[in-house]
Image (spheres, rainbow, N blue to C red):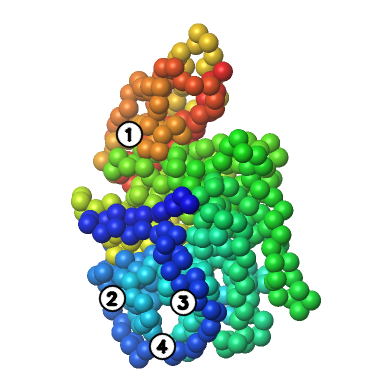
Amino acid sequence: MVVISIFIIYGNQIFQINSAERNANKNNTETSSFTSASNSNDVMPSKQTSSTFVTLYSMPGGTAPNSILVGKDGMVWTTSSKQNMLYRLDPKNNLIKKYEIPEENAGHMSWSMIQDNEGSIWFSQFGENPLIRFDPTNESFMKLYPKDHPFQMKHDAKTDNIWYTTLGEKVGVVQNTGGGKSQNSYKISEFSIGNETQTSGLSVEGDSIWITELEKGRILKFNPIYSNNGTIVDMEKILEVPSNNTQSFSIPTDILVTKNNTLWITEHGPSTITKFDLESQKSVRLPTAKSEYDVATLPFWLRQSLDGEGIWSNEHEGGSVIFLTNNMTFTEFHIPNNDPNSISFMLNLAEDPNNPNKLWFSLWSLDKIGVIDKSVLIPFDIYSEDKKITFSEGVHQSLIHLKIVKIPGHDLNNGMLYLNASSSMDPGGDLKNMTASFSQNLIDTTNMTQPINVQLSLNDQSLRKGNYTIGISIGNNLVTKTIFEYVTVK
């Protein structure tokens, strides 16, 4: 068996998720228990720091937050990866309240968090610990014990079902079959989808469940099968992508299903967000801008913007949050980091149900959580006259004509904008067997009143036949915008 691991390296610490940890408790039987919350009602202030687009909130030292959720009442919830603590932040007064989770096995990651229709908070401490429901009304915890533990979780508001992947060979669902909040009201069902799959990403679309398989690089679509009493008794596979063995996705961590038979997939392998058309069976890989840390950015989770304007994603190592607009451009919001020796490992995302312009995120390595406001105007833009480029025999160079625009009346940090190019050819965003050079790669906007024209020269150096995507980026230390050129080599 090939084991694919998602891992984080921070300082001298290594956190790794693999099949060994996943299977550590697989022989457990499904049991439940109910435990009241502890009497710890500690409330503490959070230090807030803000930049143009991003506001950060400090968490207690050693928190290492991962799963994150914005409740219907605007409260922000997160869990500690190193302590048995659930935290609630009130953004209106910057106060954090902590709740001690009844201890079983300390120090396990909680990778996902959802809120059910009754307002309860659900999270899973991945590994040997249980799936936990927290009721904010009476501040109590309830524990459920699935055989394989949830990695990604999604809530189906129509049915109130909670679906989850396991980073193993199963998909699970929690159903409230009793109509109450006691342990006897919930039923857990798990379904095997095949050996050596490592289920990760999850999307609930209508009556169907979509999942990604890390190990086999596939996307699967299932329809649940119900018994007469409404419980889910099996899963029917109705679609597999790709439909043949000629191509696959490279470590697909998450999936979103949108209209017009379109799948959006984060691929850890090439550091891209990939658009896949179900009808044509063709994909387009959109590369992130190159990271200032000179590492693969590793897009991770996906969230569909509640206003319908695009898709959010986080860069696992790139230190940025991506907003992919409906017109196929990237805006990457860079997370402030004053520690030159630390990479901003961003692990999870949560939309604000009351404000579609805001997206919350967790910074595992910095003991912080934060929020981005995309309603703030970005005072520059980039346009291209060209979208598709073809290299054929005897053609080795192509010029792309760009226009850089500054929005009047808005200052730009230190006034400087930087141009760069990335590609889908390499996990770090580099170009392979191709060079890219700008007529100028530094734009001084201090006295800029008119658009500036820039040329990008792409030079083919024995590219293999195929289709590639080139990202052309302009930005500063706060935000970067990227447009895409589509290259065909015949």
Residue 459 lies left or right of residue 340; in this view the side is right
Of callouts 1 and 2, the N-terminal one: 2
Which three-letter amino acid code belongs to the residue tagged 2? Pro
| Image quadrant assignment for residue 447 | top left
Q: Which residue is mark 3?
A: 130
Which three-letter amino acid code belongs to the residue tagged 4? Ala
The front one of 210 and 216 is 216
Q: Nearer the viewer, mark 2 or mark 4?
A: 4
Which three-letter amino acid code belongs to the residue tagged 3? Pro
Of callouts 3 and 2, the N-terminal one: 2
Of callouts 2 and 4, the N-terminal one: 4
Q: Which residue is mark 1?
A: 418
Q: Which residue is mark 2?
A: 45
Q: Is residue 133 above or below residue 458?
A: below
Which three-letter amino acid code belongs to the residue tagged 1? Tyr
- Contact? badges 4 and 1 (CB < 8 Å): no
Task: Find the distance from the CA under tag 1 to the CA under tag 3.
Answer: 48 Å
Task: Find the distance from the CA under tag 3 to the CA under tag 2.
Answer: 30 Å
Query: Residue 37, which numbered label?
Result: 4
**What quarter of the picture does the C terminus occupy?**
top right
Of callouts 4 and 1, the N-terminal one: 4
Q: Is residue 72 above or below residue 181?
A: above
Residue placed furthest toward the right: 228
For the residue labelled by badge 4, is the local secondary structure a helix, a strand or a loop? loop
Residue placed furthest toward the top: 394
- Contact? badges 1 and 2 (CB < 8 Å): no
- Which residue is located at x 62 percent, y 85 percent? 185
Task: Find the distance from the CA under tag 4 to the CA under tag 3.
Answer: 15 Å
- Which residue is located at x 50 percent, y 87 percent? 33
For the residue labelled by badge 2, is the local secondary structure a helix, a strand or a loop? strand
- Contact? badges 3 and 2 (CB < 8 Å): no
